Amino acid sequence: SQTIHQWPATLVQPVGSPLSLECTVEGTSNPNLYWYRQAAGRGLQLLFYSVGIGQISSEVPQNLSASRPQDRQFILSSKKLLLSDSGFYLCARGGGGYGYTFGSGTRLTVV
Amino acid sequence: TQLLEQSPQFLSIQEGENLTVYCNSSSVFSSLQWYRQEPGEGPVLLVTVVTGGEVKKLKRLTFQFGDARKDSSLHITAAQPGDTGLYLCAGAVHTGANSKLTFGKGITLSVRP
């Protein structure tokens, strides 16, 4: 099984509050893991990817950070949310050439 | 940066019609994937094509990878309301476990009963 668990499914947070989104995966060890953000049901923007514990690469400068404390755990965080952080956040696993498996996503609304 | 342009952006058709949508780039990709996404859910992989000129069929869906590996098309025969969704194409520059995908912006398909 290559199941990905994301929670929560929806989240409403005030501007300036912290954020922690968690993603856990099942299946083979040492997976490549990715955080994407999707705006208004359109294309996916890669935020972070990780090829192993403690290894994080950031694709775009932003108000967010990521961590990988365990092999199958990937966390997306922010110390202070901005309105522009609203969106649909997706966690994924896999190698790019072989297709990704996505979680069911978290809809974040910053108010 | 590799860009993928998908067209048309929106498509609304009647049940039973055929349709073709496109994914184009000026870059060469090692492989290209198509995903379908329903509202509030993550994308689900439909197919991966890796060889230039390759054609793959998945029931009523036919996927083709361009000879130069820069573009792809998706043809749906006799569309059904269950085909409604956002269709995303994504290209990988390197095969193997450590490549990253570039996604197009997607095609929103609505099939009316």
Image (cartoon, coloured by chain):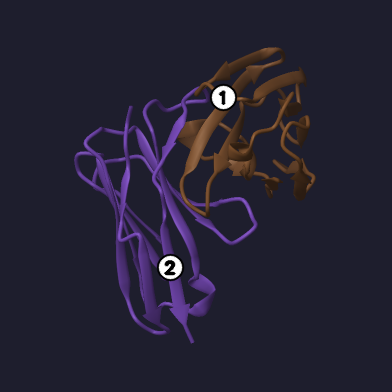
Chain colours: A brown, B purple
Q: Is residue B7 left or right of residue A85?
A: left
Camera-near label (1 vs 2) is: 1
Q: Nearer the viewer, residue A13 or B101?
A: A13
Q: Chain of mark 1?
A: A
Q: What amino acid does circle 1 point to? A: Gln
Quarter of the N terminus of chain B within the rendering: top left
* Extreme-bottom residue of the structure: B113
Disc 2 secondary structure class: strand
Residue B35 in view, yes or no: yes
Q: Are marks 1 and 2 on the same chain?
A: no
The local crowd at label 2, few if under 14, some if 14 to 19, many if 20 or more residues have their Cα within 10 Å, is: many
Q: Nearer the viewer, residue B77 or B111?
A: B111
Q: Residue furthest top?
A: A54
- Name the spot of residue B8 as percent of width and height, x first: 30, 61
Residue occupying image coordinates x 78% and y 29%: A18
Give the amino acid type for the residue marked by disc 2 in the picture.
Leu
- Could you tell me how far apart the alpha carbons at marks 1 and 2 are, in whole angstroms? 32 Å
| Number of residue marks | 2
The one nearer the camera, B53 or B13, is B13
Tell me the element at label 1: loop
Output the chain of dot 2: B
Who's the residue at 37% across and 37% down the image? B31
Q: Which residue is mark 1?
A: A62
User: To which residue does mark 2 refer?
Assistant: B109
